[in-house]
Image (cartoon, helix red, strand yellow):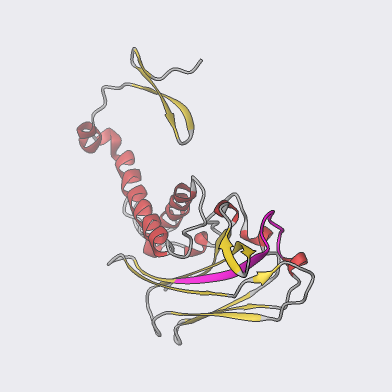
């Protein structure tokens, strides 16, 4: 039997994380903000707020590239990584640590869809070269055999390999996105020639550069390609970070 609503000082609710029970408390927001006993809590709040802001900015920056690639906890997982970056700031005092001074490699291998790992879906090795001075991010994909290099998805006849680069300004919260992708590649045991996905951003940029790489699945019907309704099987991950 599941309970919903209030029973005494307990509140029973259904959340994205499952059933939860919360206890009423006399603790007020004003007390949390002023009482010296909650100084550590306020410090944690401040850093968590910075992490949440950064995660939203990354999510927005890649929104177009990942519109069919996500899971229910994608944002929460990104906040966790952003908080790890904030806490890695080696110079600022607790509560004042900044994302910009942290270790951005913590973002590497972030999966936009945790239910479909990019590296287990697209098994072929690739090379990424970021040239900040030239404003380019090039991904080289060697020749591959689809039946071997790509995990088969029921209903899919073709797939596309895609990439995206986001140039992010954490101060102004501005970003620029560039996307590159292959054409539709059929499943089969044929050998597909090596390809290169070429992305651009501002030459000589001093902003943070994040590069994502992934794969999407399609079904061919009478010469037309349709994205599978099961977009939850598409995959993309952050594979490159360049922060100065």
Q: How many marks?
A: 0
Q: Residue at x 62, y 60 (%)?
A: 118
In reply to whether residue 218 is colored magenta, the answer given is: no
Name the image quarter holding residue 227. bottom right
| Residue 43 higher or lower than 126, as above or below | above
- Front residue of 175/106: it is 175
* Residue 5 spot, x, y in % from top left: 36, 19
* Residue 205 spot, x, y in % from top left: 38, 80
- Front residue of 163/10: it is 163
Name the image quarter holding residue 168. bottom left
Q: Going by the picture, which residue comes out furthest to the front?
A: 222
In reply to whether residue 152 is colored magenta, the answer given is: yes
Q: Going by the picture, which residue comes out furthest to the bottom?
A: 134
Q: Is residue 198 left or right of residue 4?
A: right
Q: Residue at x 36, y 60 (%)?
A: 57
Name the image quarter holding residue 176. bottom left
- Front residue of 157/131: it is 157
* Residue 23 spot, x, y in % from top left: 36, 21
Query: Does residue 2 appear in the picture of this structure?
Result: yes
Query: Does residue 130 appear in the picture of this structure?
Result: no
- Front residue of 81/113: it is 113
| Magenta residues, start to end | 150-165
Q: Residue at x 40, y 20 (%)?
A: 4
């Amino acid at each position: 039997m599941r309970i919903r609503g209030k029973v005494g000082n307990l509140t029973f609710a259904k959340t994205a994380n499952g059933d939860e029970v919360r206890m009423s408390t006399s603790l007020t927001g004003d007390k949390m903000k002023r009482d010296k006993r909650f100084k550590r809590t306020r410090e944690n709040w401040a850093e968590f707020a910075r992490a949440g802001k950064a995660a939203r900015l990354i999510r927005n920056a890649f929104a177009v590239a990942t519109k069919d690639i996500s899971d229910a906890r994608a944002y929460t997982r990104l906040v966790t990584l952003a908080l790890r970056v904030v806490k890695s700031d080696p110079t600022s005092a607790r509560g004042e640590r900044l994302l910009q001074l942290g270790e951005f490699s913590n973002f590497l291998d972030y999966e936009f869809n945790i239910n479909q790992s990019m590296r287990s879906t697209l098994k072929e090795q690739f090379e990424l070269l970021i040239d900040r001075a030239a404003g380019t991010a090039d991904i080289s994909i060697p020749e591959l055999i689809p039946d071997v290099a790509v995990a088969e998805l029921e209903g899919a006849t073709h797939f596309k390999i895609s990439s995206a680069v986001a140039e992010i300004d954490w101060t102004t919260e501005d970003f620029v996105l560039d996307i590159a992708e292959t054409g539709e590649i059929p499943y089969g045991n044929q050998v597909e020639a090596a390809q290169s996905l070429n992305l651009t951003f501002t030459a000589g940029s001093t902003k943070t550069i994040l590069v994502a790489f992934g794969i999407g699945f399609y079904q061919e019907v009478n010469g037309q390609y349709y994205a599978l309704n099961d977009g939850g099987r598409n995959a993309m991950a952050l594979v490159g970070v360049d922060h100065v």
